[in-house]
Every structure is written in structure tokens, then in C-alpha cells.
């Protein structure tokens, strides 16, 4: 689906929900002989219907799942304190699932050219294994939840931070998209928590605390291996 098709679909959904369905209900009531007040008999315009759809459903969903809101949470004092208190265990979990890979980087001596640099980073396979071992995937006995492999892949991609402006940096970004550094891993944990328990009536901070607890729970497994 292209962008304009998506927008047209939203207009059609709004018209159906706020115009067609109410009219059908009113017609049914009149057919049964019920009196209908003027306020109930009036239906919104197409523009008003679209505004209602945006305010009731679209904007709340965007605010709940947008990357900017997650990164804002990541920079908050409350979340930073939670991460700081568990930093050693989170670092241990990260190192257990990383691979030692050669990542191209811009030479610091000349400022030009590309040179290889060894660095421990987490790839999608490692992140998926982490999510599975930490019980983010699927449901749990304690909570009614469900998170699938597709969601984990999307979270891995959404946690990437690359913004580039020249050809050398674009080449580095393409390489980096295959891997995740520790800071991105921390953001991904937040995303896992919000995505896994999205239907629960809990604050984002509570979900993040729960996610960090799950992530730290695999520390004993990393020590055994």
C-alpha cells in the first residue's frame, strides 16, 4: 500500500465509522418506530469524521509507539536510574549475545578513508536469542501477553540510530544496520517492554521496570555458559 492509498483508507474508515454506521443505526431505529432526537440524527461531515478518527485512535497510537517517546523516556531521570542500578547485569547479558565483528570506521588520522575496527556488537540473531531466553517472546504464566518474532525484528530495526549526511557515513550506516551497540540494546529493552504489555493499564515506567527485570533474569544463564 502506498502513502496516498493509506490516507484514502483512513478517510474511508472514518466515513464508515462515524457517518455510515450511525446513519444505518438511525434508519433501523426509525424503521422500528422509535423517535430520534435532532442531536442523534445529525452526523459529522467527512472532515469532522477524519478529525474524530485521528483524535480517538491514530494520535494515541502514535504517541504510545513512536520512537521519539521511547527515546524521551530513555533520557528521563527515572529510567536512567533503573538502567544504572542494573547496568552490570544488562552489560553481562549484552556481551553474552554479541559477536566480535570488524566494523569499518573513518580513519581518525587522516579524516578520510575507511579502516576496519574490531568491536563487539549484537546482530539480529543474537537479539532474537536474547528476547527468547529472557522470555520476551510469547506469553508468560504471570502476565497475559504475547510478542512474536516479527515484533522482535521490528524492534531491532527501530532501535537503530544512524543519521548520515555523506557517502562515507552512509556506507558505515549500511554496515551498522546489521548490528546493535549497547546503547541501542538498552533502548530495545524499553521497546520490548512497551510492546509486550501494550494492552495493560500500566504506566510506561512500570513496563520498563518489568522489561529490565526480565532482561536481568538471564544473568545466571550467561554465567553458566
Image (cartoon, rainbow, N blue to C red):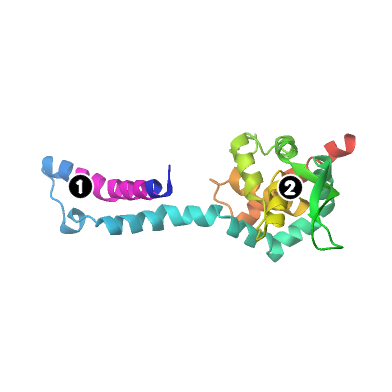
Q: Residue 168: x percent and y percent?
A: 72, 55
The one of 101 and 130 positioned closer to us in this rendering: 101
Q: Residue 137: x percent and y percent?
A: 65, 36
Q: Is residue 105 left or right of residue 42?
A: right
The main secondary structure of the magenta stretch is: helix
Q: Quadrant of the C terminus?
A: top right
* Region rendered in magenta: 7-25
The one of 1 and 30 positioned closer to us in this rendering: 1
User: Which marked residue is nearer to the observer: mark 2 or mark 1?
Assistant: 2
Residue 180: assigned label: 2
Does 140 appear above or below 53? Answer: above
Residue at image position (54%, 50%) is: 201
Helix, strand or loop status at disc 2:
strand
Per the image, the residue denoted by label 1 is 23
Label 2 packing within 10 angstroms: few (<14), some (14-19), many (20+): many
Q: Quadrant of the N terminus?
A: top left
Label 1 packing within 10 angstroms: few (<14), some (14-19), many (20+): some
Q: Is residue 210 visible?
A: no
* Magenta span includes 15: yes
Q: Is residue 188 left or right of residue 22?
A: right
Q: Is residue 1 left or right of residue 28?
A: right
Helix, strand or loop status at disc 1:
helix
Q: How many marks?
A: 2
Q: Residue 202: x percent and y percent?
A: 58, 52
Q: Are marks 2 and 1 in contact (CB under 8 Å)?
A: no
Q: Is residue 60 visible?
A: yes
Amino acid at each position: 500500500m502506498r502513502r496516498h492509498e493509506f490516507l484514502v483508507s483512513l478517510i474511508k474508515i472514518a466515513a464508515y465509522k462515524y457517518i455510515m454506521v450511525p446513519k444505518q443505526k438511525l434508519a433501523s431505529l426509525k424503521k422500528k418506530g422509535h423517535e430520534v432526537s435532532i442531536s442523534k440524527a445529525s452526523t459529522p461531515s467527512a472532515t469532522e469524521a477524519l478529525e474524530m478518527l485521528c483524535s480517538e485512535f491514530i494520535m494515541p497510537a502514535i504517541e504510545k509507539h513512536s520512537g521519539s517517546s521511547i527515546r524521551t523516556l530513555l533520557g528521563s531521570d527515572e529510567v536512567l536510574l533503573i538502567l544504572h542500578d542494573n547496568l552490570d547485569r544488562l552489560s553481562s547479558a549484552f556481551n553474552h549475545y554479541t559477536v566480535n565483528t570488524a566494523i569499518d570506521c573513518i580513519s581518525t588520522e587522516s579524516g578520510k578513508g575507511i579502516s576496519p575496527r574490531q568491536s563487539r556488537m549484537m546482530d539480529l540473531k543474537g537479539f532474537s536469542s536474547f528476547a527468547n531466553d529472557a522470555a520476551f517472546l510469547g506469553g508468560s504464566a504471570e502476565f497475559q501477553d504475547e510478542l512474536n518474532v516479527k515484533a522482535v525484528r521490528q524492534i531491532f530495526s527501530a532501535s537503530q540510530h544512524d543519521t548520515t549526511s555523506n557517502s562515507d557515513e552512509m556506507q558505515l550506516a549500511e554496515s551498522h544496520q546489521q548490528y546493535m551497540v549497547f546503547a541501542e540494546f538498552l533502548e530495545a529493552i524499553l521497546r520490548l517492554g512497551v510492546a509486550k504489555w501494550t494492552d495493560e493499564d500500566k504506566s510506561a515506567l512500570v513496563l520498563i521496570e518489568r522489561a529490565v527485570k526480565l532482561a536481568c533474569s538471564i544473568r545466571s544463564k550467561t554465567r553458566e555458559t
